Amino acid sequence: MERRSFFKEWQKQQSGEQLTQLLRLVSAFLGTYLLAELVFSGAHLEAKMKVKERANSHCEGCGKKTTKKPAGKNGRSRGNLGPVIAHLNHTRNDEYDNLANLRSHCLYCETIYHASHVGRADRIGMKEESNKAAAMTWLTTIAKKVSQKEFLAFYAENQSVIDKLFVSMNRELSDFIHTNTGWKKLPN
């Protein structure tokens, strides 16, 4: 009898680990797909160049420089945190690629822009699910590119907006961290 319960517990644990691995794989695939969709369906090349020129390598949201960052102390490449040439209103019309509708954002500002429109994505010409997916994709990209300390500082600064995103997707920070990063645990 004791062997059966041990075996059943072991099976549950294995299936839970397999589910976690499957979720990581699906999350990585969807994140890559959505990011590619956002990048390649973005502003027309000429408009992008004009926005980059206007922004002069700075985020038009927060003003920070948007260039490739060197590897952090842990040796992890922090990658490029911008610029993202982003649409303020995603409604496909004559104004779509108008310079007044485009901004050069760092990943932080683009994430917060979409996360702050959770529950009201129609105001920026998006469907709710597409907007949440965009916000989560950008957030995942940040988590993979920066140190844990830098990510948690960003989260603390924007906690109410990010928590609203997590709640809307039935997610929690700890689950997000476990699924999308190599971090062992969150600090207390």
Image (tube, rainbow, N blue to C red):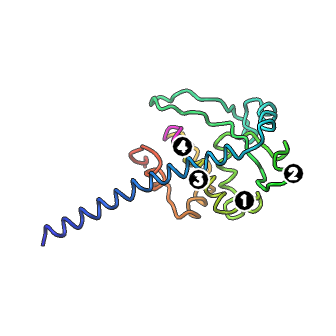
How crowded pointer 3 is (Cα within 10 Å; few <14, some 14-19, many 20+) is rated as many
Residue for badge 3:
136
Note whether 157 is above or below 46 in the view shown: below
Label at residue 126? 1
Disc nearer the start of the sequence (2/4): 2
Residue 157, x across and y down, in percent: 61, 47
Residue denoted by label 2: 94
| Three-letter amino acid code at the position of disc 3 | Met
Report the Cα–Cα distance between label 1 and label 3: 15 Å
Residue 138, x across and y down, in percent = 60, 47
Left or right for 80, reference 77:
right
| Location of residue 66 in the rendering, given as x and y in whole percent from the top left corner | 67, 33
Residue at the spot of label 4: 151
Decide: few, some or many residues near mark 1? Use Cα within 10 Å; few <14, some 14-19, many ≥20. some
Which segment did they paint magenta?
141-148
Amino acid type at circle 2 is Asp
Instruction: Measure the C-alpha gap from mark 2 to mark 1.
Output: 16 Å
